[in-house]
Amino acid sequence: MTIEDKTITSEPAGSPVLMTGKEVARQIRKQCAAEIEALKARHKILPGLAVVRVGDDPSSVSYADRITQSFEVAGITVTVIALPANASRSVLQSELLRLNVLREIAGVIVQMPLPNHIGLDAVIDVLDPQKDVDGIHPVNIGRLSLGLDAFVPATPAGGIAILDYYGVPIEGKRAVVVGRSSVVGKPLAQLLLARNATVTVAHSRSRNLFELISEAEILASAVGKPAFIPGDSIKKGAAVLDFGAAMVDGRMTGDIAFDSAIERVAAITPVPGGTGPVTNAMLLKNTIKAIKRFV
Ligand code: NAP
């Protein structure tokens, strides 16, 4: 039975598809490797990625390490710029202005969260949208909402790549996105809309949340509360993307109560091993796009 068959049925799903991210990420990396090879054949030295951090939040440090390792395996140089936690807004902005014009740098990421004394506006006021591989600049957000080519945040772009890889049809489907952050929920809703889904975005103030969830043929959750969505609230035969990544007793746990959900869904991403692995591969894809524009 194909996923199309399962998604449209209201009968129990039977054997659900576990949408693991590893294979999806591998396929994206393979495409990236071919593009990098072609670029390297034409250009002696490729510009790389800059990762800017203010302070030394441990999860930001390990995220930067993971990016550095995986990009260097792919042949892309990563420069990590770690500013002290008390660096001023203007110090950060001067650094970004310097990176904007540096020929060795094609893409720039500013790690979040920033310290309280620096607002996001400090970044978006100066960051060159052409180097904004994380898709946080209003120019890229605006272009995405207009359906134009843009840098799209890696996590929601990865969610769509997963649905495509596993053959989940999107057009005409009733999609519910729980969570409205600028890095996951909102851009994912735009991407689903661009693919002709009928999209509802739910959040902490939504009334009748579980009623909305029960209508979703495609359910995506980016909340960060472990097992927040019980399986019996999910529509039978739905395809489910779980972006949640909260630590419980040292184990990464998603938003969906997986054991009960698996009884009902047609397809679901596990946590860990679902949406997470695809994010890094998508960031590589975005960086190659920036490099192509730049060279
Ligand atoms: P965020 O900025 O904290 O946003 C969380 C969203 O959940 C908000 O929109 C919030 O609503 C909503 N929410 C909170 N409580 C709710 C409730 N009771 N009912 C309905 N909605 C509720 O988080 P984020 O950055 O989007 O990340 C979300 C999760 O995804 C986290 O676990 C994060 O670790 C994970 N994540 C995963 C990846 C990946 O690669 N897989 C990447 C990034 C993030 P309000 O807007 O009303 O407050």
Image (cartoon, helix red, strand yellow):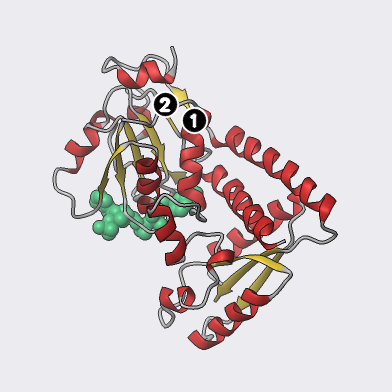
Q: Is residue 140 above or below residue 31?
A: below
Q: In the figure, 77 relative to 257: above or below?
A: below
Q: Which mark is residue 228?
A: none
Q: Looking at the picture, how far across and down is residue 152, in whole percent?
A: 49, 53
- Where disc 2 sits, the SS reads strand
Which residue position is annotated with label 2?
267
The percent position of residue 276, horizontal first and vertical second, equals: 52, 45
The image shows residue 62 at horizontal and vertical percentages of 60, 60
Residue farthest to the left, as pictured: 207
Tag 1: amino acid: Met
Q: Quadrant of residue 255?
A: top left
Judge: label 1 CB < 8 Å from ligand 1. Answer: no
Q: Is residue 18 visible?
A: yes
* Picture residue at 31% right of the left edge, 30% below the top: 172
- Amino acid, disc 2: Ala
For the residues labelled 1 and 2, say whether their Cβ atoms are less than 8 Å apart: yes
Instruction: Tell me the crowding category of disc 1: few under 14, some 14 to 19, or many 20 or more residues within 10 angstroms, Cα based.
Output: many
In screen coordinates, is 244 left or right of 33?
A: left
Neighbour tally class for label 2: few under 14, some 14-19, many 20 plus, Cα within 10 Å: many
Q: Is mark 2 within 8 Å of ligand 1?
A: no
Specify whether 90 is left or right of 287: left
User: In this orientation, which residue lies closer to the viewer: 252 or 89?
Assistant: 89
Quadrant (top left, top right, bottom left, bottom right) of the N terminus: top left
Tell me residue 278's x, y (percent): 56, 43
Q: Vertical placement of 116 versus 225: above or below? A: below
Identify the residue under disc 1.
Answer: 19
Q: Earlier in the sequence, mark 1 or mark 2?
A: 1
Q: Does residue 251 appear anywhere in the picture?
A: no
Q: How many marks?
A: 2
Q: Residue at x 74, y 61 (%)?
A: 77
- Which one is nearer the viewer's eye here, 160 or 56? 160
